[in-house]
Image: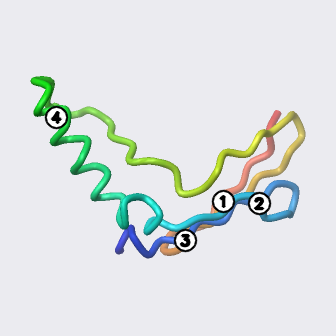
Amino acid sequence: MDPSTAVMRLYKNGECCSEGSGKACMDNPLNAALWLAQKMADQGEPLTKGEVLLSGALGPMVPVVQGDEITLEIDGFESIALTCS
């Protein structure tokens, strides 16, 4: 899987309300992860084994309220769905 080509679509109550691509994150989310790892090492606080690294979002955040039905699709992965309670 190439993270730079991953396309994400988020549906709220059946309407696509957020979408994006890995390419929008410094051309590839792995570039963002590398930048962070180098920056942390330069500051004397390198990333360590077991830490969770988030390279950024694939699309804009969307507010949700109780009862909203959310479906997330990312190319190359099974879609997931949830209802906010």
Is disc 4 placed on a helix, strand or loop? Answer: loop
The residue at the point 23 percent across, 33 percent down is: 50
Q: CA distance from mark 2 to mark 4?
A: 35 Å
Q: CA distance from mark 1 to mark 3?
A: 11 Å
Is disc 1 placed on a helix, strand or loop? Answer: strand
In this view, 20 is above or below 35: below
- Marker disc for residue 39: none
The residue at the point 58 percent across, 64 percent down is: 20
Residue that mark 4 sits on = 49
Q: Amino acid at mark 2?
A: Tyr
Residue that mark 3 sits on = 7
Mark 1 and mark 2 residues within 8 Å of each other at the beta carbon = yes
Residue that mark 1 sits on = 72
Q: Earlier in the sequence, mark 4 or mark 3?
A: 3
Q: Amino acid at mark 4?
A: Lys
Q: Residues within 10 Å of mark 3 (few under 14, many from 20)?
A: some
Tell me where residue 47 appears, x and y as whole percent: 18, 33
User: Dividing the picture into quarters, in which one does residue 7 lie?
Assistant: bottom right
Q: Earlier in the sequence, mark 2 or mark 4?
A: 2
Q: Amino acid at mark 1?
A: Leu
Q: CA distance from mark 1 to mark 2?
A: 6 Å
